[in-house]
Image (cartoon, grey):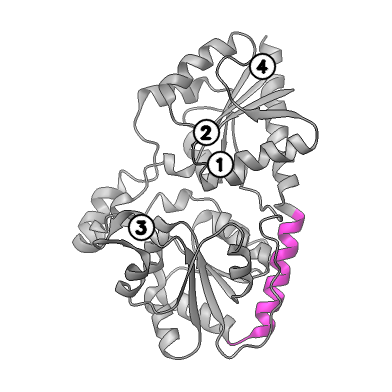
Amino acid sequence: MKIRIALLNYEKPTASDRRRRLSLINFLQHKGEDVGLYQEGEDFDVLIVANRDFERWLHIIESVQNRCQVVIFDITDNILQSGFLTTHLGLTHRFGILAKRLVGAMMGKPWPSPIAEEFWKKCDGIVTGSKEQARIFAAYNKHVVDIVDPVDLNEYNTVKIHKSRSLPVVVWEGTADNLPYLRVCAKPLSLLIKEGIISLKVVTDRYRNSRYWGTKDNRKLMRKMGLKGEFVEWQLTTFAKELADADIGIALLPSYDPFAFTKPANKILGYMAIGLPVVASGTPAYKEILSKGKFGFVAENELEWYRALKRLAQDPYLRQEMGKSGRSFILKEYTLSHYVERYMTFIQECLARKQQRG
């Protein structure tokens, strides 16, 4: 079987490209499969598209499907209209509840595009990263599956050894433009830091793509949010060590943003792979994972954030037990091999349906 994959960004592969598509290519190539990047004019059995040049792909799909070839669309969550007014420009912070209501109707939905919708409908299948995303795209295609991003243990190659610590470190790791999500628990974090119960570490790129509160500098943005802590530049070769040097991982998403409720559970799975207990916002994907074992806590408001972080900070044994449970869960359910197996099962199902119709 010949599989070709069109990345979201060829020149500078995104984090999603690295986690989902390039990991799929590398794993299958290692197994001797004929898998690689899409090139114009090449024959194949399966084409997986992440790129959003929908006019181009709509033309291609009509051509290749006539030759009984399968086309699958692999979504990246930012194809859903995010609350860019909240996460990038900060307008809802300035204008309050009214702005939240005005942008609420725009968020958590695909960008309005008749060409994109026609392409999605013609695909042989759609792969999403969460059940909420699958629910949304089921409106365009009845062959939709949710496959959470894998945890590549070659990247998450350090395991936390929990010890008693006078000042446990709470860590947030993520993309630069998502740092404003720290506002969700900025007050509890700031209070716990002032009380001498925790310290804070942020692992991300220093400079954002867009301004937030008048700056692209995430160090300045942390100070504007009233947060004091260590700022570490994100690097692929060192981020896992930085996580393992912390004690508690946090994953934050705003409750008023419908886009946040479609996000997959990638962040907490990464923390769990390192062996960190987690505290996470109450989104469907986070709740689903944390309901499967004693890996951490869901926090729905500032008081719950304060209590969960304080409890973990003051109990090294609890941190150790939750960290071990999370790591074991990842090894059992969310490694790269599990991801590839689920993906290939869906591909085979799409091929079987095509052959039956052909």
- Amino acid at dot 3: Tyr
- Amino acid at dot 2: Ala
Tell me the distance, in whole angstroms, between the alpha carbons under discs 1 and 3. 28 Å
Tell me the distance, in whole angstroms, between the alpha carbons under discs 2 and 3. 28 Å
| Closer to viewer: mark 2 or mark 4 | 2
From the image, tell me which residue sits under label 2.
50
From the image, tell me which residue sits under label 4.
354
Asked if the residues shown at circle 1 and circle 3 are in contact, with their CB atoms under 8 angstroms apart, the answer is no
Q: Earlier in the sequence, mark 1 or mark 2?
A: 1
From the image, tell me which residue sits under label 1.
17
Q: Residue at x 50, y 84 (%)?
A: 198
Q: Which mark is residue 256?
A: 3
Location of residue 43 by image quarter: top right
| Closer to viewer: mark 2 or mark 3 | 2
Q: Earlier in the sequence, mark 1 or mark 3?
A: 1
The span picked out in magenta is 314-332
- Crowding at mark 2 (Cα within 10 Å: few <14, some 14-19, many 20+): many
Q: Earlier in the sequence, mark 2 or mark 4?
A: 2
Tell me the distance, in whole angstroms, between the alpha carbons under discs 1 and 2. 8 Å
Q: Examine the residues drawn in magenta and state their main secondary structure.
A: helix
